[in-house]
Image (tube, rainbow, N blue to C red):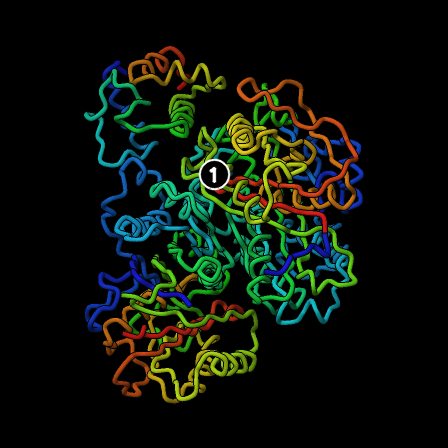
Amino acid sequence: MIYVHKIASVTPQKELLPASIDEVNESVNNVLKVVEPKYEGVPLSILRRMGKAVRMGVGAALPLINTLEFPLNGIVIGTANGGMEDCIKFLNQVIEFEEGTLTPTNFVQSTPNAIAAQLSLLSANNGYNITHVNRGLAFENALLDVWMLLKENKTHTYLLGGVEEISSYNYNIDYLADWFKKDEVSNKAMFASETEGTLSGEGSAMFIVNAFPEKAIAKIDALHLMHTDDVTEIERQLQHFFNQHLEDGQSIDVLVSGENGDIRSRHFFEASERLLKDATIVRFKHLTGDFATASALALTITCQLIQSNVLPDHMVKIDRHKKNINKVLIYNQHKGIQHSFILVSKPAA
Amino acid sequence: MANEELKHTLKEQIIKYLNLLEKTPADIKDDQVLFGEELGLDSIDSVELIVLLEREYGIKIKDPKEGRKVLVDVNTMADYIIANRTR
Amino acid sequence: MSRIVVTGIGVVTALGDSVAANRDALKKGQCGISFLELFPSRYAETLRFGEVKISNEQLKQKFKVRDKGVTRTTLLAMHAFEEALQNSGLTNEQLTSYDTALIGANTVGGMCLTDELYHDANNDFEGSEYISSYDIGSVNIYMQKHYGIKGIGNTINTACSSSANAIMYGARLIQHGLAKRAIVGGSDSLAKFTINGFNSLQILSSEICRPFDASRQGLNLGEGAAYLVLEKQEDAVGKKVYAVLSGYCNASDAFHPSSLSDAGDGPYLAMSGAIQEAGLQSHQINFINAHGTATVNNDEVESKAMLRLFKDVPPFASTKSNTGHTLGGSGAIEAVYSILSIEHQELYPSLHFETAIESTGLKPLLNYVQQPVHHVMSNSFGFGGNCSSLIFSKA
């Protein structure tokens, strides 16, 4: 059982959940880039070396850590690529200067664990420090790690996060691998798109979590991750997940769906909807774009929905007119082979 | 290039190579110790500055001890550039 | 809590392409570090590396890999994985069941193909066959599909301690009932990316590395992979048990992105945490496979942390003097070497050492010895101050 106590994020939107579609920032050339805050509290002498992923991760997490009432026992981050821009900047130097004299800063910043490492440095935290990078299940593994940590140490508190940056380089790579749309589609119309590919996005989501229910904003009941491309397998495992984790009489109020406007993955999301005939279906990737750790932002959004009990219209695909948002299922998939279910509920008052 | 002009250009290059946010050439004095408290530079920065000397002025510094003598302040860097530049 | 035991091991390094070949070379004090023969780099004839002298084509043939886009990091991982699998006697049914986890680690992924990545990242015409194989996760994701493993899959990156942390994560999945068995390890292949990265930090030695020597000048990069099969002791009845994974701990040094603190807080916390987790006292540790990269910073700090923790520092050695620093592979490779010391009750010497570091006076073990070995500690410290220690014990 994981209780979420604080959330912070950096996303392509000014507010995490814009109230109306008019307030939703629009994608440019099929990309949704984050609106970066000023990062007050991060020393300039350190900020100068950070690439965007590290900046977004540290910028969102540091204020959470600095205002913590509990001691922090460790830092657990999920990111598929970490500082991709620094990585390719360094790589470009390797090639362009023919392995000559090169500057090390990009190299040091390019390791995916730079976010968790920089956070431990800035908060003088000697605890457990780990970075999970298993692409579309990087954040899920971070969540699973925290779940185990809190079973091992019931009084501990951890920082949990998911971060991904989009640079022109990794956009290029994933574009050439056919993961982004070739036709220009606005994020505001992405779910109606009938073409292959999704929109590219980025973001950082940070959580303070422990096993104490008092004053928690959300409770993570269960998590399941899968590696398969078989939709019947997903249906079977989702049914099994409900049997295991929903008590008699309990039902899902809202499905937060990772639908991403790619016709190749639509059948996965339709399958999850078939098993949730009474739940309101909401989508979020028009706010964030798609990326390997988008499920981290899905969790932030879910926490916010549970806390506010308000669903902005532009997120709702099918309204089943629920009075209260008490139990939410997040279903996300990445590139058709990595899938996850996260069950979140409102903590008892 | 006159000495003063070289120092100004060098300061701009230092700011660019080290990405010194919100600093201008006017903020770096000619005799200000580079690796002191104020600029907050460290060993990784010293490597960046050695790369600067190679890429901008064609000067290769192989021996770290030599590097420590050159990278004291803007004055020592400029003097070394004038004496050793190949471009 | 159950005891987690090791029921299979596999390793490939510059010392050899099997557990037996690696052990033989360790016993003889052989060094696998040389100039480059297979990997093209400007530094092929000026710097030395722990290169595995098996070409990608040979590896692909050996494992009948016909898929496109399979990189050397993956092929080396498969090499060690298949040996570990064979040793463990897992059936195909067990391998492909929902309760088998596959936890990998590496630091370069498909970036060993630095030139191909350069073109794919900077151009917008057709991508190469490696377009989906550059990220670190690609190694494990490919293997999960290739071997049909349906349980939890994960990849960990904490720089040079990555695969030590993968071993920890796999053990914890079993402890929590999230897997019945876990195949854990890591790999890395030589890459222009890492060669030039470490070179830019001026921590590559132009000579063969000399861990813990006063005149050490830096590290030699290497490549390789190792995998372990972990199971609960009660599930391994009747099987060959190589060793018990009795303790582990990860801690952060929280000091600098690329060097360790003077007092070695991170290394001290990792080592002492692992001893505590194992329910041991420091004097019970018979041997330490040190991180020992031969950089000026690491060896002095690691020595100081050992002096802080141990009243009498036990015999220790750095097998990086045999294999070079294999980055994401090193934690798992050195875990295998630690397990071999327990299995065969023998300790392997550290190479290329002459004079102790003045401030510590510590000398690594310099001869092959046979002696009772109950508990071996293996250290792995990575960039960002990521420090992990594992303890393997006699079953």
Q: Residue at x 46, y 33 (%)?
A: C259
**Which quadrant of the figure has residue C133?**
bottom right
Q: Residues within 10 Å of mark 1 (few under 14, many from 20)?
A: many
**Which quadrant of the figure has residue A283?**
bottom left
Q: Chain of mark 1?
A: C
| Residue A101 x %, y % | 48, 28
User: Could you tell me the amino acid type at mark 1?
Assistant: Gly
Which residue is more in the foreground, C54 or C325?
A: C325
- C250 to C15, vertically: above or below: below
Which residue is more in the foreground, A239 or C280?
A: C280
Q: Residue at x 33, y 32 (%)?
A: B18
Q: From the image, which quarter does the N terminus of chain C lie in? A: bottom right
Instruction: State left or right for residue A349 relative to residue A224.
Output: left
Which residue is more in the foreground, B11 or C52?
A: C52
Q: Secondary structure at mark 1?
A: helix
- B3 to A259, vertically: above or below: above
Q: Residue at x 50, y 28 (%)?
A: C297
For disc 1, the marked residue is C266
Instruction: State left or right for residue A185 relative to residue C261.
Output: left
